[in-house]
Every structure is written in C-alpha cells, then in structure tokens.
Image: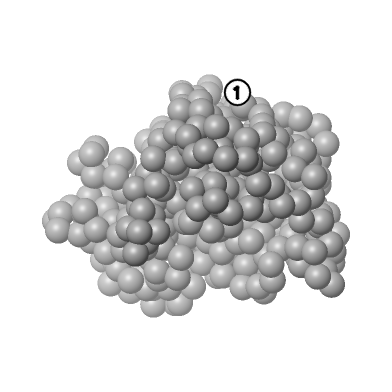
Amino acid sequence: MTKQVLITGVAGFLGSNLLDRLMDEKYSVIGIDNLSMGRMQNIAEHLSNPAFRFIQKDITHEDAFADVDTDLGCIVHLAAFKIPRYGKALDTLQINYRGTETVLELARRHDCKCVLASTSDVYGRNPDLPFSEEHSNCVIGSSKSPRWAYAVSKLFDEHLALAYQDAYGFPVTLLRFFGSYGPKMHLSWWGGPPPVFIDAILNDKEIPIHGDGMQTRSFTYASDTVAGIYAAMTRAEASGEVLNIGATEEITIVDLARKIKELSGVPGELKLKFIPYDEINPGKKYEDVMRRVPDTSLSQRILGVTAEVGIEDGLLRTIEWQRRVTLPARQG
C-alpha cells in the first residue's frame, strides 16, 4: 500500500486520532470534513505539515472528491451521522448512505483499499454474548423506534461495501467499533456517556442515567481503536473481513458514573438523575441494548491487536484531557 491515505471525518474524534498516528508513521494524508461535528482544534497541529492536506467539504455531495487527483493507497471512511434517538433519523439514514456511496465510488476509481467504520449497534437486541462477527446475528428492533436508524444505516453500508468489493474487485474491511472514548471526543452525547458524565462531575451537576443504569457497555480507549484501524489498513489479511474493534471489559452505566466520580477526585456526593426511557424521546418508542460486549478473537488473529488500555487508565487520561480543555470555559 502506498503511503497516501484519505480520511473522511478527519476533524472528528477518531479521524483526528488516526491522523496523529499516520503523521507519526510518516504517511501523506488527505483529510476531508464538513466540520458539522468535527473541530479544527483537533487537527490544528498538522495544518502546517506539507504531508497533510485538509479539504472542507461534505462527502454526501457528488463533487466532494473532485480535486483528489493523486493516487490513493487507502481510504478510511469515518464520517457518519448518528444518535437518531433524539430525532433526525432521516439525516442518519441519508447522510450515512450517500456518504458511503461517494467514498466507495472514489475507492473504485482509484482501485484502492477502503476501510469503513461500522458499529457494535448492528448486533442490536441479540441476547447472546459476547458478540461474534462470524456467529452472532444482527437482531434489529422495531422500525417504529428511531433508535435503530443508525444500526440499519451501518448494516446497509456494510452490505454496500461488500457488494462493491464483489462487483469491482477492490478490497474493503469493515470495523465494528465498541464504545470508543478518549481525548478529542465530542463533549456531548455524540461522544457517548463518558464525556457527558465527566462534564457533569467536574461541574457538580446531576449525571443523566437512561433507564435504571444497569445496562452494560464495553468502552475502548482511542489509541486501541486507532491501532485496530491502522492494522486493518496495513494487513492484507483484513481484506473482505468484518471485524470487532473493542475492549472486552464490561461495566454498567451506573458503575461507569461511580468510577468517573472516584477517579476525578472531585469531592461531594455522586448526583444521579434517572431518566425513564419514555421521557428520552416523548411520543417515540425507545429501545435500549442491555448488554454489549465483543468477541475479539477474530480481530486478534487477523489484525494482531488487542485492547491494551484498561478502563481506569483510560478514564484517568480522558478526565485529565477534558479538565484541561474545558477549564478556560469554566473559569471564564
């Protein structure tokens, strides 16, 4: 693979962390982002590097890649729209389909490898854990619940990518991420529970807990997710595969809040606000996933990677980062 890589969603959480890794590895990178959710601060340190070129465009537009005229060795497609539980299910479905189609068309024209981000959400309501790429079915809930629009959009993206591979012969790898968190994440629900909980604790606010908080997740530190992406880019064995990328340590949402409170060193009592599911999106049916843990044996065998950063170490690093980037705002 040539060292010319294109990253969609480069100014977002995982895109900017992957950019850091590729700059360290001396790659030449083209990054594209419409900055709807990404932030220029995430990539600012690389803007003066001649090995990095930034394009501010929307990948759902047909001309998004019109001026990408250099040979590409790999495209890493991370740009996406999510969280339809609060509305905007139409945006989720249309943006993810259209964006992925334009990316796959670009990969077809350049005949290059394409690594696409999927999600653990695709396993849906499957009760059998851990989730295996080879043996676990994708069990999607009711179409009347907007909560499943993101999972459905990513499942369609997976099928579309594999169909492009079959039709045109260029290799694709699909990565199902499990709960990535860490520096440069979005400081809202877009970034998942960790940033929301950290912000609440640092600012002595109530922590919003959906349901009873006994649902479990496995959270993966950014560097471990990026290691999986990098291996998928560089290993030929990954072509044509669907792979889980994540840590296997399982924690309840309530215990996550307690752990962040403990690690933050902030005095005082833990303030929890339990929000019934029927109040999350009034008038819409809401369904949650009660447990989510990956089987990572296939990714370990094919990619040679395993999560190395434990939940306490990762949260400590993330709390320190979030405290640092939000301190000026709190002081002001």
Please name the amino acid that badge 1 sits on. Answer: Ser
Q: Position of residue 74 (x, y in %)?
A: 36, 49
Q: For residue 199, say whether it is visible.
A: no
Mark 1: few, some, or many residues within 10 Å (few <14, many ≥20)? some
* Residue that mark 1 sits on: 297
Q: Give the answer, above or below, for where 71 lies relative to 121.
A: below
**Vertical arrangement, residue 195 with respect to residue 225, above or below:** below
x, y (%) of residue 48? Answer: 14, 58
Secondary element under disc 1, as helix, strand or loop, is: helix
- Which residue appears at 22% of the width and 50% of the height? 28
Identify the residue shown where x is 80% and y is 64%: 279
Q: Which quadrant of the structure image shows residue 127?
A: top right
Give the colour scheme of this rendering.
Answer: one colour
Q: Residue at x 51, y 28 (%)?
A: 312
From where the camera sits, is residue 186 visible? yes
Q: Is residue 326 left or right of residue 25?
A: right
Quarter occupied by the C terminus: bottom left
Q: Quick check: 210 above or below 259? A: below
What is the x, y in percent for residue 275? 76, 56
Front one among 202 and 156: 202
Say which quarter of the image contains residue 214.
Answer: top right
